Image: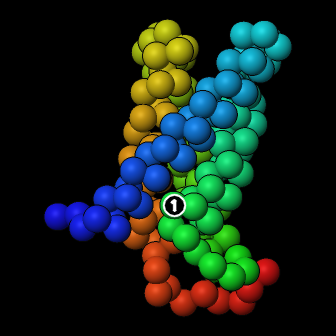
Amino acid sequence: MLDKKNLLELVRFCMVGVANTAVDLGVFFVLTLLGGAPYLPAQALAYSAGVVNSFCWNRKWTFKIKGKTSWGEMSSFLLVNLSSLLLSSLLLFVLYDTCQVPLWLSKFAATGLCLLVNFTASRRWVFKVGKAAGDAL
């Protein structure tokens, strides 16, 4: 059961997630549809743009982490997002190239699954309140 603070945190995380997804999808479709870029490199660039947005907003606004960013926090965040990038790229490849699912539908499916993975990892590991901070950057 979520208390008021945790519910607000979840709502904020979802709002940031919508913004991250918009950044990701916007960059992806501009690169692939308008720029003619291959979809896997476009996926990496688009996902990276969403990751930068995600870290900044989730750290300061969603989870209200104060102080300097620690090496542990940054490495945890990057590990979670690198894992999500690899998972989303694999899903995109399997759905689009192997199963012949339309690119837009493949992208949305991969993105949806990775949003769930990111929320769980961010809440329980990366931005966990009271976690040892490590060395500040």
* Type of the residue with mark 1: Thr
User: Going by the image, does 14 lie left or right of 4?
Assistant: right
Work out whether residue 61 or residue 101 is closer to the camera in this orientation and state it.
Answer: 61
> What residue lies at 58% left-to-right and 75% top-to-bottom?
65
When the figure is inspected, residue 2 is found, relative to residue 13, above or below; the finding is below
> What residue lies at 62% left-to-right and 65% top-to-bottom?
60
> What residue lies at 62% left-to-right and 26% top-to-bottom?
25
> For residue 56, what is the image quadrant?
bottom right
> What residue lies at 54% left-to-right and 47% top-to-bottom?
16
Residue 94 seen in the current view? no
In the picture as drawn, the residue positioned furthest to the right comes out as 35
When the figure is inspected, residue 108 is found, relative to residue 84, above or below; the finding is above
User: Going by the image, does 44 lie left or right of 92?
Assistant: right
When the figure is inspected, residue 86 is found, relative to residue 34, above or below; the finding is below
Q: Position of residue 124 (x, y in %)?
A: 40, 70
Work out whether residue 32 or residue 92 is closer to the camera in this orientation and state it.
Answer: 32
Dot 1 alpha-carbon crowd within 10 angstroms: few under 14, some 14 to 19, many 20 or more: many
Q: Position of residue 20 (x, y in %)?
A: 59, 41
Scheme of colours in the image: rainbow
**Which quarter of the rendering shows the C terminus?**
bottom right
When the figure is inspected, residue 88 is found, relative to residue 36, above or below; the finding is below
Per the image, the residue denoted by label 1 is 62
Q: Position of residue 6 (x, y in %)?
A: 33, 65
> For residue 40, what is the image quadrant?
top right
Q: SS of the residue at dot 1?
A: helix
Q: Total number of numbered labels?
A: 1
Work out whether residue 64 or residue 122 is closer to the camera in this orientation and state it.
Answer: 64
In the picture as drawn, the residue positioned furthest to the left comes out as 1
Q: Position of residue 62 (x, y in %)?
A: 51, 61
